[in-house]
Image (cartoon, helix red, strand yellow):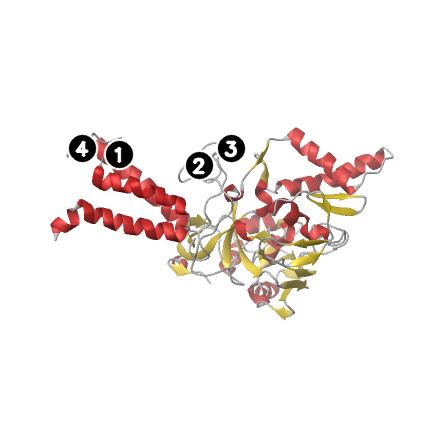
Amino acid sequence: MSRILTNRWFKFGCMLFVYLLWTLWIGSWWLLLGVPVLFDIYITKKVHWAFWKKKGVEKQSKAVEWIDALIFAIIAATLIRMFFFEAYTIPTSSMEKSMLVGDYLFVSKVAYGPKLPNTPLSVPFTHHTLPFTQSTKAYSDLIQWPYKRIAGLGEVKREDIVVFNFPAGDTVVVGRENPDYYSQIRGKLPDVQDAAWEQGLSVTPEEAWSIARKKIWRENEIIARPVDKRENYIKRCVGMPGDVLEMKDAVLYVNGKKLEDNDKMQYNYDIIVNAPFNRVKLQEMGVSMEDINSGYRGNNCYVLPLTVEMVEKIKKMSNVLSVTREEEDRLIFPYSPNYPWTRDDFGPLPIPKKGETIDLTLENLPLYDRIIGAYEENKLEVKDSVIYINGSPADKYTFKMDYFWMMGDNRHNSADSRYWGFVPEDHIVGKAYFIWLSLDKDKSFLGKIRWNRLFRFIH
């Protein structure tokens, strides 16, 4: 038996079988060019592929053995991260109470099918920036591959918790990544319009945008990132391709039906008290110390993210005078006077579906201009009230990809689709699958470990 296991033809046959299965899975016949390499490694041995080893020496030095093990580990870990699963951590409270700050989780790449890298030349175990630097790229743009997703175990389903590349992260203000580049431009628009008004001038929305954009570029270092090197976000998928979404008084409806149990969601509440809160009691209720500290606005006023159950408990406290849900935020996608929506009241909004053809008008263009121009890489222009796509007048458009609508469970503390719109299918990374560790940053030593969240599947 040992002779068979050590036989070079047996080893070659096993590796060839695995390699051909992998080639079939990826669906690229170019990988067959690797078969002669495997044959030479195991059979002919004409090329010294393991150049770090001394050829013909049976017993290698300890240093060479370590190098050999390290190279194998890097290759194996890279393939596992690319095709099977990857470890992530939750840095913000946007998904509370489903996902907590300090949760460490595995994200399954095979759940929806691994996405082959758009940018294959990159430093192992990095994302977009080299460690200990602010803007030094950890990848090279020399090779850019088109979007391709290989077969997986299933497809994105409504209410899945999904990891995806940030759609508005294609352009980045170095050192000031949050809020995103486009939000920073929008933040300067009132100043641009006020300055023009003081000079007795008027500017169109397009002119104001151009002026604000140039100011951002003058004052900051701006970089662009390919799809697979944009920030990773995690949200809940609430809108599928072809769905119609509507939110009424903070209740979400999909295709006319109420989607979720609103009791599980968090919203910001304005709270007025006659004496400061006992912070320990708030923490025991599930409010983080960060939210408590940032939520105190002075004059015995607080703004805290709470579930319905937490609101009822707070209302019963003797020092509480009033509890009201925070006022609406009107800086909402698609940022057009045609759609005066808020984060708690928007829609009806149709979610684009691959192959679907829509009538394109100046009125609905704000919903789809980023899809047409940025995600599906067309040249989009409007001249004399006529829409042009790739130089030709257009009154219809057919979508090339499926799109999704992602929202955080912490509704008033989540930068999600309400602020930057649809998530294209080529931005989907994987499905949040399993929490293997959870640490509470407000605690110390073993008290930091949230024991009830360890080794827990995510629903």
Q: At which x and y percent is residue 367?
A: 69, 53
The first of marks 4 and 2 along the sequence is 4
The first of marks 4 and 1 along the sequence is 1
Is there a contact, CB below 8 Å, between mark 2 and mark 3?
no
Q: How many marks?
A: 4
Q: How many angstroms separate mark 3 from mark 1 (CA)?
A: 35 Å
Tell me the residue that label 4 is attached to.
Answer: 60
Tell me the residue that label 1 is attached to.
Answer: 50
Q: Which mark is residue 121?
A: 2
Tell me the residue that label 3 is attached to.
Answer: 134
Of circles 2 and 3, the one toward us is 2
Q: How many angstroms separate mark 4 from mark 2 (CA)?
A: 31 Å
334 left or right, relative to 403: right
Secondary element under disc 3, as helix, strand or loop, is loop
Residue type at numbered disc 2: Leu
Q: How many angstroms separate mark 1 from mark 2 (CA)?
A: 21 Å
The first of marks 3 and 4 along the sequence is 4
Secondary element under disc 2, as helix, strand or loop, is loop
- Asked if residue 273 can be seen in this view, the reply is no
Q: At which x and y percent is residue 1?
A: 12, 53
Tell me if residue 109 comes above or below residue 321 in the rendering: above
Residue density around tag 4, few if under 14, some if 14–19, many if 20 or more, within 10 Å: some
Residue density around tag 2, few if under 14, some if 14–19, many if 20 or more, within 10 Å: some
Q: How many angstroms separate mark 3 from mark 4 (CA)?
A: 40 Å
Residue type at numbered disc 4: Gln
Is there a contact, CB below 8 Å, between mark 3 and mark 1?
no
Is there a contact, CB below 8 Å, between mark 4 and mark 2?
no
Residue type at numbered disc 3: Gln
